[in-house]
Amino acid sequence: MITAVAPARIRSVPPATWAVALLLPIGPAAIAVLRLILPYYTAGDSADMVAAVNAHPGRQTAVIWLAYVGILTLVPGLFAAARVCRDGAPRLTAWALALSVPGYLSLGMLIGYDEILWSTSNAGLPVHDASSVVDAGHPAIDVSIGVFVIGHVVGTVLLGLALLRSGRIPVWAGWVIAVSQPLHFVATVILGSPQVDFVAWSMTAVGLAVVARQVLKDPLTR
């Protein structure tokens, strides 16, 4: 007697799930490149910023496009990551979202600041006049900078800890996410190093790529 063996069922991943998973590393990877090529990274004041953008207008154009990619992908990626850790660490996940979402949404205001720098350069304004335009920016820009810095740094730490507590990803990946944005803060405020900043954001991208793998293989996270 011959027993027929049923073919193994291959679980397919819906295209929408692939799209969501891809969003996770794309956002921080875009910001990693942005921070590496930012013309005015070590600028001391608005005049230095204007001069740096005047010297590298192509890089400033790339910065604006990369920031736009970040705006489109970072927040959806956060919600996808939250689905991985929400059951295992609901409070940490909630706080991570409460801080990170407004932080990343504030990029929309910050990209306007970069657009002003590019526009004054593209219009051929003298450095003094361009600096005056930059200095006359609305106070909401300063508020958005504060919300962005506090929100995304602290929020990413909490997200990494939530993922660690959930046990859904490798321990090393959770720690990579948790320490990446404090390293970004150190690179920006203390070291003034775009190379270290690139590494920091790349760490976020690598950690979230591991989260994306979990999204693809576990139907409970969809």
Image (cartoon, rainbow, N blue to C red):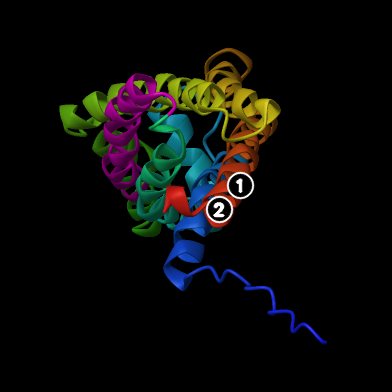
Which element type, helix, strand or loop, lies under badge 1?
helix
Amino acid type of the residue that numbered disc 1 sits on in the rendered structure: Ala
Q: Is residue 95 covered in magenta?
A: yes
Residue lying at the far top in this picture: please name it: 190
**As displayed, is residue 207 above or below residue 184?**
below
Residue lying at the far right in this picture: please name it: 1
Residue span colored magenta? 88-115
Residue lying at the far front in this picture: please name it: 1
**As displayed, is residue 108 above or below residue 184?**
below
Report the side of 144 relative to 50 (left or right). left
Q: Is residue 187 covered in magenta?
A: no
Q: Which residue is mark 2?
A: 59
Q: Nearer the viewer, residue 7 or 122?
A: 7
Which residue is rendered at x = 53% and y = 43% of the image? 28
Quarter occupied by residue 92: top left
Q: Which residue is mark 1?
A: 209
Quarter of the C terminus within the rendering: bottom left
Which residue is rendered at x = 54% and y = 18% of the image? 182
Q: Nearer the viewer, residue 138 or 121?
A: 138
Q: Position of residue 214 (x, y in %)?
A: 57, 47
Crowdedness near tag 1: few (<14), some (14–19) or many (≥20) residues, C-alpha within 10 Å: some
Work out whether residue 56 can be spotted. no
Q: Are marks 1 and 2 in contact (CB under 8 Å)?
A: no
Quarter occupied by residue 143: top left
**As displayed, is residue 168 above or below residue 191?**
below
